[in-house]
Image: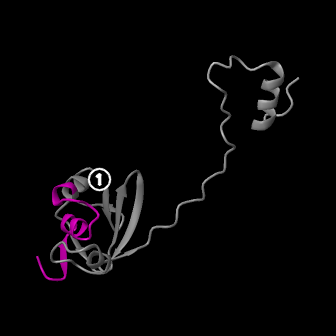
Amino acid sequence: MAGDSVRVDTWVWGVRLAKTRSQATAACRAGHVRVNGATAKASQAVRLGDEVRVRRNGFDTIYRVAGLPVRRGSAADAAQHFDDLTPPPPPRVERPAEIVRDRGAGRPTKRERRDIDRLRGRGDAG
């Protein structure tokens, strides 16, 4: 391996995207790591300028390789080895608060049910 590249599992581990090298290798095997759009094997070489996508917690995070760490260092050192290109998440949709009834209050009356429907935006019932 030349000095201008490093294994993708080592890079993912070195920039602290995985806690252990074994977890980084397992993520590559599971297809959670992509290099330049293609699924990466753990031994694939990563070079400066490559785009690495890592699937974490159900979402893809996109990084550009800005450095090749020789060993795992502090979080501040790791941040120098990549540029985060991940777009911001979409805004959360506002929902009305859930209607909470006191426990043991029984079923709502017809008037209470209509008030609840109106509050939830279901329109006038009846």
Check the picture and name the quadrant holding the N terminus.
bottom left
Tell me the residue at 31%/80% (across/down).
Answer: 80
- Magenta region: 1-23
For image coordinates 74% across by 20% down, the residue present is 108
Q: Residue furthest right?
A: 126
| Residue 120 locus on image (x, y percent) | 75, 37
Q: Is residue 84 left or right of residue 89?
A: left
23, 73: nearer the viewer:
73
**Who's the residue at 83% across and 34% down the image?**
123
Q: Three-letter amino acid code at disc 1?
A: Gly
In terms of image quadrants, where is residue 32? bottom left
- Residue 18 placement, left or right of 126: left
Q: Which residue is mark 1?
A: 31
Residue 69 position within the rendered picture, expressed as x and y whole percent measured from the top left = 20, 77
Residue 20 among those drawn in magenta: yes
Q: Nearer the viewer, residue 75 or 8?
A: 75
Whether residue 48 appears in magenta in the rendering, the answer is no
**Relative to residue 39, is residue 83 depicted above or below?**
below
Outermost residue on the left side: it is 1
**Which corner quadrant of the image does residue 78 belong to?**
bottom left
Q: Give the colouring mode of the picture.
A: one colour
Q: Position of residue 117 (x, y in %)?
A: 78, 31
Q: Quarter of the image holding residue 46?
A: bottom left
Compared with 106, 36 (above or below) is below
Q: Quadrant of the C terminus?
A: top right
Check disc 1 and report its element: helix, strand or loop: loop
How many numbered discs sit on the rendered protein? 1
The picture places residue 4, in percent across and down from the top left corner, at 19, 82
